[in-house]
Amino acid sequence: MSDATTNPAVTYSNYLKVDELLGLQQPRSAGPEHDEMLFIVIHQVYELWFKELLHELDLVLRLLMGDEPHKAQHTLKRILTILKVMVAQLDILETMTPLEFLSFRERLEAASGFQSDQFRQIEFVLGAKSATAIARFPEGSRARTALQKRYAEPTLWDAFLRYLAREGYSVPAAHLARDTSQAVEPSDEIQQILIQVYRNDSRNAELCERLVDLDEGIQEWRYRHVKMVERTIGTKQGTGGSGGAPYLARTLSRPVFPDLWEIRSKL
Ligand code: HEM
């Protein structure tokens, strides 16, 4: 048998699985309502960006653990560029008016971005670990397995502190050997070390600045998402069962790397 029979030539369509991809947008409304297509496409695009962000965040962790800060910074720059695109994409969904959303909202039943396991995975990698978030996913599901794996793993902040310790900074042992399934908490001792980094070590201070960029990027997404929610559903409850915009507003005051923000007023 020829190779061409067993292995058909690679084409744009079979490499990217275009037929499968285009079959994945399945509106639930009768008609269907025109705007439901945009709603589905934009959420699917976000899930793909979440996948790519996790792929790149995993690389940053490996690079920091392998003492390759320059490459880690390069990858962080890519992550920030993706985040900017992700924030900008909310503009598209904001062209949907409250009434256009209401035309199909009830067909979403209890479905909500609140149930995005990849978003929770990103939170876990960035230090916001939560056992409750895992328990929301069915036993044995892909989502739960992925979250359970990430729950125990070191966060980006753990990888960074271990890197700083290898760079000669006296990071306390309690931080280096902490239970990485717990959420990252602010620390005065770490802030003192970061102040030294900013004052005397421009190379690592630069790396810290990229982490602040990442933090700001995530906060920017959260802010733009809550504003979009306010203009689309006001203060109505979310389909996911939360209080809606007031719940989301509370997530705005939680930075990813609190120590990096705290030191700014101490420098
Ligand atoms: C009309 C558009 C949208 C509305 C009205 C909306 C509304 C909401 C609401 C009310 C919540 C709170 C949880 C709940 O009770 O449901 C939520 C959470 C969330 N949404 Fe959206 N959303 C919209 C678009 C999007 C898009 C495009 C994404 C992209 C994936 C997204 C991702 C998320 C995520 C990740 C959460 C969880 C946030 C957290 O717990 O910190 N949403 N959304």
Image (cartoon, rainbow, N blue to C red):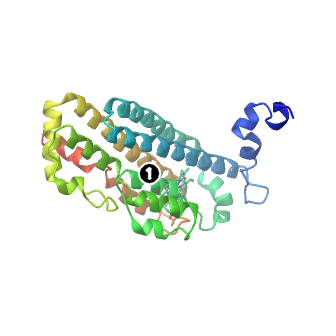
Please, which residue is most extreme toward the front here? 1
- For the image, the number of numbered tags is 1
Residue at x 26%, y 41% (from the top left corner): 163
User: Against 110, is 216 above or below?
Assistant: above
Residue at x 20%, y 43% (from the top left corner): 165
Residue 187 % position (x, y)? 18, 54
Q: Nearer the viewer, residue 119 or 145?
A: 145
Residue at x 39%, y 64% (from the top left corner): 130
User: Against 133, is 193 above or below?
Assistant: above
Residue at x 46%, y 55% (from the top left corner): 121
Please indicate, yes or no, whether residue 99 appears anywhere in the rendered image: yes
Image quarter of the N terminus = top right
Q: Which residue is mark 1?
A: 122
Residue 240 % position (x, y)? 53, 66
Residue 10 % position (x, y)? 75, 31
Element at label 1: helix
Residue 221 % position (x, y)? 44, 46
Q: Residues within 10 Å of mark 1 (few under 14, many from 20)?
A: many
When asked about the image quadrant of residue 153, the answer is bottom left
Q: Nearer the viewer, residue 207 or 237?
A: 207
Using residue 158 as the reference point, say whether residue 92 is left or right of it.
Answer: right
Image quarter of the C terminus = top left
User: Against 99, is 208 above or below?
Assistant: above
Q: Is mark 1 within 8 Å of ligand 1?
A: no
When asked about the image quadrant of residue 182, the answer is bottom left
Using residue 148 as the reference point, say whether residue 40 is left or right of it.
Answer: right
Please indicate, yes or no, whether residue 96 appears anywhere in the rendered image: no
Q: Nearer the viewer, residue 72 or 191?
A: 72
Q: What's under tag 1, amino acid-wise?
A: Ile
